[in-house]
Amino acid sequence: MSNEGQLHVILLGAPGAGKGTQAVLIAQRLGLAHIASGDLFRQEQNSGSELGEIARSYMEKGLLVPDEVTVKMILGRITDPDCAKGILLDGFPRTLEQAKALDQALTEQGKGIDLVLYIKVSNEELLMRLSGRWICRNCQAPYNVVELLPKVSGKCDHCGGELYQRPDDKEETARKRLDVYFAQTMPLIEYYTEAGKLVEIDGGKAIEAVGEDLIAAIGVRIGR
Ligand code: AP5
């Protein structure tokens, strides 16, 4: 398998683990395309597309969007020109079926996943983070009321967009998302461990420290 200088990295972790927060920083630093399945679904909802409406009906209940729909969307996205240096997947794959479909698609292109970074955080911390999160309606950058306040209240530091609380961050839906994560996404930890690709990162540290650990893990894997 040869990735021809490209890097294919997956960020794995529960809702609220910090995948989106770290993905923005890492993708920028390494020149990778940040592909976040949840962000893509929210963009589809904002555009009023049929895919967006299908996704909304699952997301508002805290359930996963069906594999068929999700896989088609992501496999289409990973061939875009901005993926030339590599990709950083955030929120995908989330089921064994998605992981196998991704492996197959990459294998057909003579490529493969280099590394899966599993950001591990305790359940209490996850629920606390989700209830304190605000995101930008425009660029989806995440903020929180404890560690990462925007410079101007209610406005995104990056694009000036309006900050809002995601409807699926309400406690009942957030708990459902965590249940779904443990039932449907946790098996991926074994899948990628067996493939020799998984590295566990302590996501309970401060944002900057987690970022340094993630960058160091990528550096070790690619020999830099
Ligand atoms: P998605 O948007 O992917 O949400 P998620 O995986 O549930 O993840 P989150 O965005 O909630 O958390 P995160 O890990 O990115 O944390 P963040 O960095 O924001 O998915 C939403 C829905 O879309 C799913 O429920 C499903 O319906 C559907 N979907 C998406 N992908 C799918 C797929 N592949 N298959 C099927 N359906 C799919 O951080 C959280 C908060 O904590 C922020 O406020 C942040 O500032 C703060 N924070 C981050 N790191 C730290 C730290 N180290 N210390 C303190 N605070 C921190």
Image: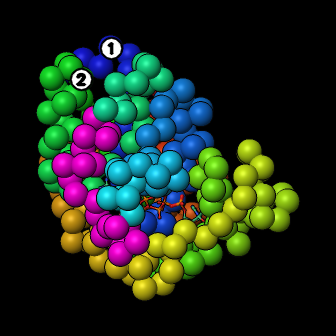
* Residue 8 in view (yes/no): no
Label 1 amino acid?
Glu
* Residue 17 in view (yes/no): yes
Badge 1 or badge 2: first in the primary sequence: 1
Q: Dot 1 lies on which element?
A: loop
| Highlighted range, magenta | 57-75
Quarter of image, res 184:
bottom left
Side (left or right) of 43 relative to 101: right
Q: Look at 18% across and 61% down and name the residue there.
A: 187
Label 2 amino acid?
Lys
Magenta residue check for 209: no
The x and y percentages for residue 1 are 19, 20
Q: Dot 2 lies on which element?
A: loop
The x and y percentages for residue 51 are 34, 50
Quarter of image, res 73:
top left
| 1 and 2 marks in contact (CB < 8 Å) | yes
Check disc 1 and report the residue beneath it: 4
Check disc 2 and report the residue beneath it: 111
